[in-house]
Each structure stands twice: as C-alpha cells, then as structure tokens.
C-alpha cells in the first residue's frame, strides 16, 4: 500500500518537491471517504507543506482533496477544500468563497487557520441520487487552537459530481504529504477513523 509518487503528484511537483503517502484502490466508485486528520506541528523548514486526504479517478487527471497547508507563509496551517485538475487549475471553495486560480498561492488567504493538535473530521460523501458531493469537515480545536480562540466549527461544501468526476468516477482514496522546497519536519501525520465506502463486494483492497 505504501508506494512511490502518484502520477498526478509528479505532474504538479516541481524541482525540490517531494510527496509521501498511502492509498486505497477498490477499483470501483468510492461514494464515501471519512477520516479524521490531526494537524501536526508547524513545519520548521521554509517552503510549502501540504497534508491531505482526497479522492482521484483512475485517470489521475483530477484530485478532490481537503488540504492543510502553510502556503500563506511559514508558521501557520490553513485548511480548505481543493480540486486540482491536470491543467494545473486549482479551485478552492471554502466559506462560500469560490476562487479559481492558475498560480499556487493566489487568493488562498480565504482559508481558515487551523492549529497543531486540532482534529478535523473530514467527510466526502456522494449523493448518488442528486449527483452531488457533500464535503464536510468539523474542526475540534486542540489546546493550541483553544488558546488562539478557535472554536468548534463545521463547514459544508457542495461540489457537483460532474465537476469532481469529470475525468471518471473517483476510485482512489489517498492520504498524502507534499513538500515544495521544505522538508517533512513536522512529525507524524495522524489519520484516524478511516471509513471508505465503495461500490464493490471485493474486500482485498482494504487489507493490502
Ligand atoms: C483542460 O484544458 C483542456 C484544453 O484546453 C480543456 O479542453 C479542458 O476542458 C480543461 N479541463 C478542465 C477541467 O478545465
Ligand atoms: C461519514 O461522516 C458523515 C459526517 O460525520 C456521517 O454523516 C456519515 O454517516 C459517515 N459515513 C459513514 C459510512 O461512516
Ligand atoms: C459511476 O458512479 C455511479 C454512481 O455515482 C455509478 O452509477 C456508475 O455505474 C459508475 N460508473 C462506472 C463506470 O463505474
């Protein structure tokens, strides 16, 4: 299950970039991905760091992801829903602000701050009747976040399936760290309570 770079990651990773991850491939449409991600320490290195769970189709031409990142400037994590397609187009939709960008780092200051020790319960849930994804996350602050005045919050983002799955049904669930210029120097990244629902009766994919 642990493997090397994904094709999509290779596409978007430039010089000095690295990615680490594991993923599940049921070889069938995934309709739910639930996971709790714990925000790790603030990266010590400069550069950009991303941490995320997400979904991709077999084609690897788009990734639908909920991303913790420090692209706003070293020393802080923020959090947002992202879709990145094979053209390098990035769409964020957080708190009703929809930003379409061609350049990493443009407009990302709309993303909420999160803090080391926060638990973010993330849910990607496809409503097969309406063809929409509900991407919901609930942030439970840790002690650092509470100290900063952060309170429990829930954010819902509705994404049309046609947009997320324009390149095929989403069939891969990924758990990834990416570094651009920096290093993985923020300790363990913890993913708890992973639930993946896929339209298959096969079970091998969850065991190996
Ligand atoms: C990517 O670019 C191609 C060529 O311009 C276009 O046909 C396609 O619709 C674009 N994909 C997205 C998701 O915008
Ligand atoms: C996934 O999480 C959502 C939000 O908490 C919840 O409503 C849903 O029942 C969960 N789905 C599964 C299969 O656990
Ligand atoms: C894509 O997913 C839908 C459920 O949203 C399913 O009805 C359809 O059969 C899937 N297509 C393929 C090719 O698996």
Image (spheres, rainbow, N blue to C red):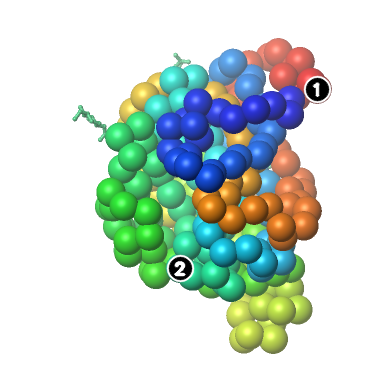
Residue with the mark numbered 1: 207
Estimate how packed mark 1 is, as few (under 14), some (14 to 19) or many (20 or more) residues with alpha carbons within 10 Å: few
* Looking at the image, residue 68 lies above or below residue 84: below
Closer mark to the observer between disc 2 and disc 1? 2
The residue nearer to you, when weighing 190 against 124, is 190
Point out residue 203 in the picture as x, y percentages from the top left corner: 75, 17
Say which residue appears at 64% left-offset and 20% top-offset. 26
On the rendered structure, is 81 left or right of 25?
left
- The residue located at (31%, 43%) in the rendering is 89
Please tell me which of labels 2 and 1 falls first in the chain.
2
Q: Is residue 161 visible?
A: no
Tell me whether the residue at label 2 lies in contact with that at label 1, contact meaning CB atoms closer than 8 angstroms: no
Question: Residue at 73% of width from left, 29% of height from top?
Answer: 2
Residue 146: x and y in percent read 69, 82
Q: Which residue is mark 2?
A: 72
**Gap in Å between the C-alphas at discs 2 and 1?**
38 Å
Residue 133, quarter of the rendered image? top left
Q: Looking at the image, is 15 positioned above or below residue 188?
A: above
Q: Nearer the viewer, residue 63 or 182?
A: 182
Q: Residue shown at 44%/20% (left/top)?
A: 59
Residue 100: assigned label: none
Instruction: Kindly state the secondary structure of the residue where label 1 is placed.
Output: helix
Q: Secondary structure at mark 2?
A: loop
């Amino acid at each position: 299950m642990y493997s090397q770079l994904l094709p999509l990651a290779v596409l978007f990773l430039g010089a000095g970039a690295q990615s680490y991850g594991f993923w599940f491939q049921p070889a069938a449409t995934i309709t739910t991905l639930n996971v709790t991600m714990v925000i790790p320490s603030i990266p010590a290195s400069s550069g950009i760091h991303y941490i995320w769970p997400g979904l991709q189709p077999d084609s690897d031409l788009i990734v639908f992801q909920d991303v913790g990142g420090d692209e706003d400037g070293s020393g802080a994590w923020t959090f947002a829903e992202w879709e990145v397609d094979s053209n390098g187009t990035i769409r964020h939709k957080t708190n009703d602000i929809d930003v379409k960008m061609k350049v990493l780092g443009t407009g990302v200051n709309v993303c909420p701050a999160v803090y080391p020790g926060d638990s973010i319960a993330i849910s990607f849930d496809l409503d097969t009747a309406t063809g929409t994804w509900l991407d919901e996350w609930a942030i439970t602050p840790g002690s650092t976040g509470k100290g900063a005045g952060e309170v429990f919050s829930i954010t819902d983002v509705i994404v049309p399936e046609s947009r997320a799955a324009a390149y095929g049904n989403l069939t891969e669930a990924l758990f990834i760290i990416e570094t651009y210029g920096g290093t993985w120097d923020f300790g363990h990244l913890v993913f708890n309570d992973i639930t993946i629902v896929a339209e298959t009766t096969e079970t091998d994919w969850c065991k190996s």
